[in-house]
Amino acid sequence: MMFFSRWKTAGILLVCLLGVLTSLPNLAPRAVFPDWFPVRQVNLGLDLRGGSYLLLEVDTSALLRDRLEALVEGARRGLGQATPRIGYTGLQAQADQRRMVVRITDAAQRDAAMRAVRELAQVVQLGGGAQSPDIEVAIAPDGLLTATVTEAGIRTKAGSAVEQSIEIVRRRVDETGVVEALVARQGANRILVQLPGIDDPDRIKQLLGRTARMTFHLLDETANVTAPTPPAGVMFLNVEGTNERLAVRRRIEVDGANLTDARPSQDSRQGGWVVNFTFDSVGTRRFADISRANVGRRFAVVLDDKVITAPNIREPITGGRGQISGDFTARGANDLALLLRAGALPAPLTVIEERSVGPELGADAIRAGIISLAAGAAFVFLYMGFAYGLFGWFANIALLFNLVIMVACLSLLEATLTLPGIAGIVLTLGTALDANILINERIREEAKNGRPPLSALEAGYTKASGTILDSNLTNLIAMACLYAFGSGPVKGFAVTVAIGTIVQMWTATVLTRLMVVWWYRAARPKELPVMQRPGLSLLQRLARPLFRLVPDVTKIPFMRGARTGLMVSAVLSTLSLVGAFWPGLEKGIDFKGGIVMEVRTPAPTDLGALRGTVSALNLGDVGIQQFGDANTALLRMPAPEQETQVQQVVNRVRAALEQASPGIRILRVEAVGNRISDELFRGGLLALGLSLLAMLLYIWFRFEWQFGIAAIVTLILDTTKTIGFMVLFQIEFNLTSIAAILTVIGFSANDKVVVFDRMRENLRKFKQMPLEQLTDLSINETLNRSLGTSMTLLLAALPLALFGGDALSGFALVMLFGIFISASSSVFIAAPIVLYSGRNRLRMDVAAPVVAAPAR
């Protein structure tokens, strides 16, 4: 274990060198590197560089309506044009039953009618290369013919619509000139759009929200537009921008899908803005045929169920070019041309979640993150150096490479670094040293027991390796659950902490061991620098630990307070659960939905004036409070009942604020619909529940069942008390706090695994020692390690509370409380549960001679 061959040493150094080289490109902007250079960098999240996050949902129900309408029109043509004509009545679509119905009046024509309707079927691909029609046609004895859209047909059409929508959304975003935009599928029918550098995405939302399906129809000059319902085959549509209503035939004469180009320009005759378009060969031929056969009739250009223009056809148009005129502004004409070039969406899109951060707030977040990271690193480095001497400084060097390799891994993944991700890096500073503390405490223990230096080093690394693996796997379990069921920036936190955990296991057990071996070969010490000795020089004293959190040998009878600890914990957890229901948790926007806007005014904010401005919009209970400095305020509004109205509310509030307070800046906007907030809430609770279950199974597998039960009960009690702390201090319960709770659970399980591992070791070592005494002995032996890890995590989390700003203050406070709860619960809850549940199984407390631990 303490021997490194040349190739192994070279491999370790090569990993460190590659980590440094892979991380270096992050110090320069991407534009500095030539196009051929394979540069990979960590991307800054929208909360750090500013931008907008939009979650769009494809309205797949509209696909069913369109399909049924197409079946109705197709049946009308097919039955009417049959030879002889097929008589029918009651032709209609029944969307609630996914079918079209028509009654065939002549029994002799029923077979012909079924053949005509079956010809309207579209082929869908099934699994294994099989094919099937998308409708099932049947006819009843009374002549009622039905064409029902199959599940496979709906599923295939929905999947195709989402893929098509993604491509069209990407083209529309690219046309606007947004750089490095991300468009990706999320789930079955949702599209994620990230727009860096866009702090007011209103125009983008308008462009993405329009279906932009343009079709050309003939007007029905004989229809009465004042009638309450249109005749068969006709629809009443309004002319955009007016109250004029026109009778438009449902039959699509030319489809906008045949457009090849659309450009805005100014009309040379009237001076207004128009859109010139060009058809492909199919559209050109169809447009020529229709215009040639209908000279003198009005031809309507319909966009998203509104008539843009309906000019008279004066002469055949055979060149495949046309012009759309209307009351366009320059931007309106440009946007319409953009939409027509990008293509029509197959189904409407709805913005169900929006998060926008201005660049000013992003710069503040970066500054807060850097300060927190620097302060946390300084605190942790000094503590390790002074508490563990030379070996502590070795651990600090390994921690530096841990950070470098972690950044390298994030760069290779081209991961997105968010503010919670920076918090994850800061916390990694504390958790990464846990393995080094375990190793150093083991080495110190073995040296005090009289082992020679090389043997003590060997035993320290060997005996600590199993505990390091167990304790870190529990943390990885928590992060895996958070990544699986979290959302947005919280996923970045999970990835960062998981990578940091994996890397630190390597740096702590391999890299520090290599440095220790180099030192040992060079110095050949007679004793290890793990304890102070009289008569040492200042340099020699600095190379040894300068202080201990607790003495090396303690005999604290912790189990005398076992009953008291369990009772106090039960009472606190019960009160916390009661508080979670009344007065209840302060749910954030992630979990209760609504709209949050952070604004900054040129002068100190007049909260009363802002409240009056927003209240005048009649949006419900509006909360306004000062946020941070005197010029910044936070507005909270409930989510409207209809998700489609969320963006309308955001736009109304934005316009009202800008009109009432000129110079106001919108720093941040978060809008979450009720449905998406319910999904996030369920996902967060599921992540908590599954992480607890996974840890129970793992500890049960690695230890006896008593340890597994003790761990899970203690983790549940730790979680409930943390929730009670959040209720007491009104800390928002959101995705970030879920990340904090899961981090606390991971750390708490880590701490308990260390105690359990020492108890298991002592059970084998002291076979006749009573379980109560053995439990006290195990806790006392691991006391310095438990408090040391708690101290490093505390020193890493404290700067987040001091310098992390309002965005991370709740996260940091939950972490600080969780560190205290986790450390105490290992002693006063987990250990007593093992004691009482294992008294007659792990160890029979028979009247046997007591075997004391060796003298220290």
Image: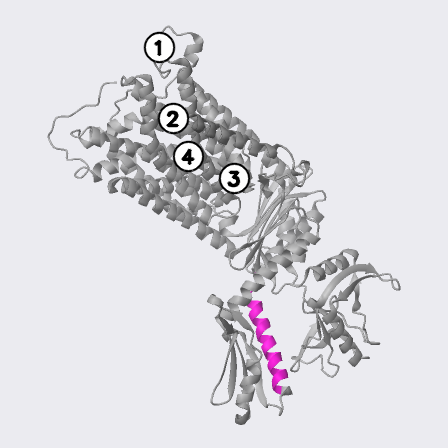
Say which residue label 2 marks: 437
Q: Is residue 689 above or below residue 459?
A: below
Majority secondary structure of the magenta segment?
A: helix
Tag 1–tag 4 contact (CB < 8 Å): no
Judge depth for marks 4 and 3 and give the one in front.
Answer: 3
Amino acid tagged 2: Ile
Classify mark 3: residues with Cα within 10 Å, few (<14), some (14-19) or many (20+): many
Mark 1 or 4: in front is 1
Query: Mark 3 or 1 closer to N-term?
Result: 3
Residue kind at label 4, given as amino acid type: Phe
Closer to the camera, 572 or 831? 831
Which SS class for mark 4? helix
Sequence-wise, which precedes: disc 2 or disc 3?
3
Secondary structure type for disc 2 = helix
**What residue is shown at x 67% (from left), y 69% (from top)?**
305
Amino acid carrying label 1: it is Arg
Q: Nearer the viewer, mark 2 or mark 3?
A: 2
Instruction: From the viewer's side, name the closer residue of 671 and 23.
Output: 23
Asked which quadrant contains residue 93, the reply is bottom right
The residue beneath circle 3 is 420
